[in-house]
Image (cartoon, rainbow, N blue to C red):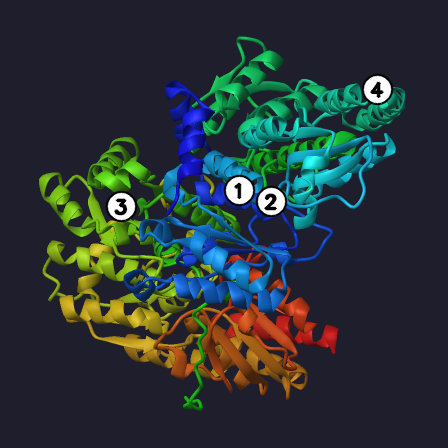
Amino acid sequence: MRLSNADRLIKEGCNREKKDKLCRSRGGESCAFDGAMIVLQPIADAAHIVHGPIACCGNSWEGRGTLSSKGNLYRMGFTTDMTELDIVYGSEDKLYRAILRTYEAVGPSAVFVYATCVSGLTGEDIEAVCRKAEATLGVRVIPVNAPGFTGPKNLGNRIAGEVLLDYVIGTGEAPLTTTCDINLIGEYNIAGDLWLVEPLLKEAGIRVLSRITGDSTFEEITYAHRADLNVVVCSRALVNVAKEMQLRYDIPYIEVSFFGKTEMTKALRAIGSRFKVLSSRIEEIIQRKERELEERLKEFSHLKGKKAVLYTGGVKSWSFISALLDLEIEIVAVGTKKSTYEDEEKMREILGEDAPLVEDVTPSNLRRLMKDNNADILIAGGRNLYLAMKEGFPFVDVNQERHRAYAGYEGLVNLAEDISNSIRFFSQESAARSRVRRQESRKTPEKSEISLDRDLVINPLKHSQSVGAAIALQGIDRALPVIHSAQGCSFLAKVLITKHFREPVALVSTKLFTEDIVMGSEERLVNVIEGIIEKQQPDIIGILSSGLSEVRGEDMAEAIKRWQVANGRCKVVHVSTPDYAGGLETGYAKAVEAILESIECERTDYRRKIKGQVNLLVGSHLTPADFTEIREIIESFGLRPVLLPDLAALDGSRQDFSSLASGGTRLSEIKRMGSSEFTIAIGKSMEAPAKKLREIFGSEYILLESISGLRDTDALMDILSTLSGRAVPHRYKRQRRVLIDGMRDVHFYFGGKKFCIALEPDLSVQVSRLIQEMGAVVDLVVIPCHSGSVQRIFANEVRVGDLSSIDNRVFDVLISNSHGELAAKRLGIPLYQMGFPVYKIFGYTTKITIGYRGTLGLINDMANLLKEVH
């Protein structure tokens, strides 16, 4: 694999001192792969194929806020989903077939093919494959060599820029040019920013020839070399493109920002200075827009003197400083971890030499900065949203996941409104809390056919094992999962998990770089473990492998064992979770099993059972509210359950932020599991951990494939009654009667209806049984990977595949996660959102889906959906 682009950018991009800042600690918290995707994926009519295991695409697709007026192709995810066999035997032929199938499926104007850590490490020659596919198809097929271990996000941005220079820019001719044509470089149209700026440029007589790359087409970038001026928008990461175009095509460039009144006005004047004939028209627009803005901002005069802590990506830091100063908000601290030296210099130009720049932007330090400076609002990226929520800090998201445009004059009004609303909301909430404190001083299904296409995954349903393991560890108090990988693996996983639970989650990375791949990474792993113990003092650390570390051949288990013997200060558990095998459900189960294995060496006298204590191994398919519900059900029978894991605290009930998982099962409780009288496993995936408990401690178990629906909840109640020797409590008898009445009320809407389900296997079993019980037909179930649950799914057909595996037959409802939105639109049917991730609706984590009352809620929701449509 050729890495010359990365080598050249590191060499030329900065001197040795700046290299570390730009290309490592200052390059962003994600990886080069993610950075390249951020730049290129907004090209709306191109397809983007990720050549690697599932994690890179599965954890990131549909995760960015870029918008386009030119179709939905850019929102789709394509990956080869490399397996262990692909790693052993090579997968270049598979990649070639994947490119051909992509072209056949969606007819893109071009195809970008991305190397990842695993395909980069195994030496896949993606350039040769791309050349072969291009010759076959007659469209551009472009390799992007930016595996995550080469560096951070900013480096990936620049590699993507080099790709555009080498393969795209200068390869086409514009149908029409004017004397006032510009390119916008580094504007990704996040939340529609571009749509608030481009009309102003058009009114001034300035035409945007090429957008690089927000709301763009592939063709328009091919003739970007015909522009009269390059305007680099808030993106030092792509300044290499502007500099090279100046050398190659003699196109001058300027750097501007569109955030805030001051910067927007500067930008218009800077552009106008290059087109003298337009200067007077631009001044008229500026004067009019500033007058209108001044009038509209009077509504937000109460923001004057408010204090803000700002932490966002690189250039946006100084851009938003200017916008906040336009609102007369005082900047009390600015995080610089993701900023280059040039960014810092810009910040000092605006704020002065005593600018309050802060390198340490860990959650604990952000919290301290907010409190010590008596700040009124935290302005940062979406990953810090739930830190702010837990601490009661007003918050505005200004990063790429946001949903509102902040560019231009109109965008400043939007920003002021959002800041004002957030401060007002939390002020009211704080007052309300103060008032409260004062006041308080079986049927066997037909055999299903399984089909699988492994060459290409389109719109992945599957997520990596490390995501599942990381979720499981959130359910153990004072635990911290660590992914042994390039930094993008943990970054993208953390963003995804946080979006789903709407809670801060504990997850870090060992941040492997090229030298670790070459020289070995055991020392880095040990240093990370010791650093975590010193700073955070967890009770348990889960070391999760990745495709990169597994293919590299690191013997992590032995390294951890040696360290544990020598130190023993903290329990460190190794979980093998390569992303080229299994999926979320298997990774979750592996983590639970690894934790149970780790307590074998800490046996007490487990032969003396604790009367009434039962183990509850809960699968990944339940919501946090379900964990609370099942605990309360079991306790109502006089039993004492020990849940592993216990994700109940992720329902929003935690009030304090912690860098460790909090509120789950305590390590002391896990150590007592061997003394439980019985084990209940919920979900087929939990059978292996249950068997492990039996193997170690002799604890018998029962497997419950579903605890939703009338029939399966009845079975749960019977089991608990038998274990406890007590009758079913009256409240559940009443809930049962209410459920039966509700089922009778809505069964007309279910009768004869056809459902399609695209979920993880355990949840597919539970939901399909409920749908069948209501008299509807599950015509098709798509699961992300093979599972022992397949034969227990009630469906006419089961496929192992992706969201594009859902064919265009007639369905009435699609039940899937939030990524199912495009598939539902294609089918013209409603989407009922369940599973992981669910982030396009609110309240999922507090939704009960099990037991009598959870079942009633589900069937009522589905009936309302069916009634509304039909």
Marks 1,2: beta carbons within 8 A: yes
Marks 4,3: beta carbons within 8 A: no
Amino acid type shown at disc 4: Lys
Q: Is residue 840 visible?
A: no
Q: Position of residue 855 (x, y in %)?
A: 53, 74
The secondary element bearing badge 3 is classed as strand
Q: Quadrant of residue 381?
A: top right
Q: Earlier in the sequence, mark 4 or mark 2?
A: 2
**Foreground of the two, 361 or 722:** 361
Q: Earlier in the sequence, mark 1 or mark 3?
A: 1
Disc 4 versus disc 2: distance between alpha carbons? 31 Å
Label 4 crowd (10 A; few <14 / some 14-19 / many >=20): few
Q: Position of residue 371 (x, y in %)?
A: 50, 24
Marks 2,3: beta carbons within 8 A: no
Label 3 crowd (10 A; few <14 / some 14-19 / many >=20): many
Left or right, residue 605 beside residue 851: left
Amino acid type shown at disc 2: Val
Q: Earlier in the sequence, mark 2 or mark 3?
A: 2
Q: Quadrant of residue 89?
A: bottom left
Q: Earlier in the sequence, mark 1 or mark 2?
A: 1
Q: Which residue is mark 1?
A: 163
Disc 4 versus disc 1: distance between alpha carbons? 33 Å
Q: Nearer the viewer, mark 2 or mark 3?
A: 2
Q: Earlier in the sequence, mark 4 or mark 1?
A: 1
Q: Is residue 18 visible?
A: yes
Residue placed at 9% from the left, 40% from the top?
566
Disc 2 versus disc 3: distance between alpha carbons? 46 Å
The secondary element bearing badge 4 is classed as helix
Q: Which mark is residue 276?
A: 4
Residue placed at 65% from the left, 30% from the top?
249
Q: Which mark is residue 541?
A: 3
